[in-house]
Image (cartoon, rainbow, N blue to C red):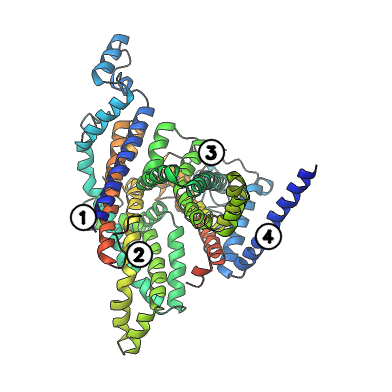
Amino acid sequence: MNQQAAAKTSIFEVITPRLRFLGETLGEVARRPSALMGGIMITAILLTSVCFPLFYPVDPLEQDLLARFTPPAWQEGGSWVYPLGADNLGRDVLARLLYGSRVSLLVGFAAVLVAELAGIFLGLFSGYYGGKLDSLIMRVADIFMAYPFMLLTISVIAVLGTSIFNLILVLGLSDWVTYARTIRGSVLSLKEKEFVEASRAIGTPHRVIIFRHILPNVISPLLVLGTLRVANIIIWESGLSFLGMGVPPPMPTWGRMLAEGRLYITDAWWLVTLPGLAIMLTILSINLLGDGLRDALDPRLRNI
Amino acid sequence: MLQYLFKRLWHTVYVIIGISVISFFFIHLSGDPVMLMLPGDASHQEIEDLRQQLGFNDPIYVQYLRFAWQALRGEFGQSLYYKIPAMQLILERLPASLELAAAAMLIALVVAVPIGIISAVRRGSLLDMGSMFGALFGLSMPHFWLGIMLIMIFSVRLGWLPTSGRGTLAHLIMPSVALGLSLMAMFARLTRSVMLEVLSLDYIRTARSKGLKERIVVSKHAFKNALIPLVTVAGMQFGFLLGGTVIIETVFAWPGVGRLVVQAIFNRDYPLVQAVVLVLAVIFVAVNFIVDMLYMYLDPQISYFEDK
């Protein structure tokens, strides 16, 4: 009972300053117009991606051969039945774009989460314990760094086959190195600090020092890195999808819409233009937000 | 200096060994090539004979050593699909890919560096804000989409440039622009931020106060020091270019290794896939090694004697 109470207060004590810090950071971000715009845009995109079936309950797979190549509504020959037109099989482009957003966002965020988790663990242990473990992890990291990212994912996907789960795992696990290196660097300097030495002196277990004392202090650069990496992962996901190595059909993805639309480039501009615009808007809003976060969290880079 | 060189060389060697282990591992995971080599109605005895003959029954480390020894001599076995040595295919296609990557890098640097310098010098001006906003757009645009858009505008609508293939300079323009644009954006941002940092240093103030022309201060004194991070990042981004060619070559039907590897994946031609991956990874490591050497030459401040 007593112990529980103690645990509760200490968790509270840990969380409150973090929350305050988070609030300050968000305030700092919101003061930058471009970052604020990025934040609003990505929030809108996320909300749309989750809630759209409420407002636009259209089946992205339903074919209507009579409606093949219907142009977007504002163009001659278009109709509001297909606001953004129809594709080569008469499927609704807007519905496909909306469903495609789920794939891209899910893969983007989940893969970054996988990468961050792997990177955090390996980076923490590598930096904290040092020695043989450290050099082993860092040597493996060197090898991963040398393997061009796209080729690594392609060669794994070629062997494992395509599925959304494989995609998340592969993109995530190919990308842990940057996080691990960043964390390791901060841990190396932190572990020499007095507060860590003090906890060690009073016999705090390593596990507690690592996760309670060190981790909270090294997490903010990862927030920035993670945000910017989501953008990259989404580009790679759509690229793989474009090549036919992404999430398998029938699930619509932005990359595959581009690949299919490319065949009709002479007649149907909307099939190749709109999915790309969707990718670009998503990436742009994430980049705007990420840049703002970086400036807010890393004062050294401010105004540069 | 020499000590650093050897250390760096050793680093390169073990990374290549690591990559070869991963490649070997993937080939192994991708299944039994014997099944793909023999006709479907081959008898059990025939399969076993071929396995024995090709050494697939040896212990795994013996198989790896044999693979490594052959890879060292540039032998990656036969492509299952083309039925000719994988290395021969790669050597035929490699020049096209390197040409594309080099053109993309050149375009990116030639456009981005002046933009970055001018933005830094005229910081806060309309030009600065405009080009930095443009750079953010460039970073956010998937290069394969840019490629498709270029084809739609310049080939389909205007008919100015060929849609695909390789040969003349006109063929090279769109693929290299598409591949180079995000690099261009990245270099422009980097050049600008490095130049801003350098321009605020004391020695620049000294140079200005002794009456040197601003043009000379910027180009001779400041830019020289901004070069170092630029060279490093350019070298690191070479890997991105090699990866990027995979998609861009598919968009433009460019006959390079990127397109080769995509086709090989769809043909389940695993030896060819791993050979391409291994060769590209080795090229990438070699480029990084060269960049590090350049770095040593460009930045005499850093001491390479310390053993750390």
Tell me how far mark 3 sits from mark 4, CA to CA. Answer: 43 Å
Give amino acid for label 4.
Pro
Identify the image quadrant of the N terminus of chain A.
Answer: top right
Give amino acid for label 3.
Met
Chain at tag 1: B
The circle on residue B168 is: 1
The circle on residue A17 is: 4
Circles 1 and 3: CB atoms closer than 8 Å: no
Marks 3 and 2: same chain? no
Circles 2 and 4: CB atoms closer than 8 Å: no
The circle on residue B233 is: none
Circles 3 and 4: CB atoms closer than 8 Å: no
* Image side of residue A272 versus residue B167, left or right: right
Question: Which circle, 3 or 2, is nearer the viewer?
Answer: 2
Q: Report the front residue among B218 and B166.
A: B218
**In terms of secondary structure, where does tag 1 sit?**
loop
Marks 1 and 4: same chain? no
Q: Is residue B172 visible?
A: no
Give amino acid for label 1.
Thr
**In terms of secondary structure, where does tag 2 sit?**
helix
Tell me how far mark 3 sits from mark 2, CA to CA. Answer: 43 Å
Marks 3 and 4: same chain? yes
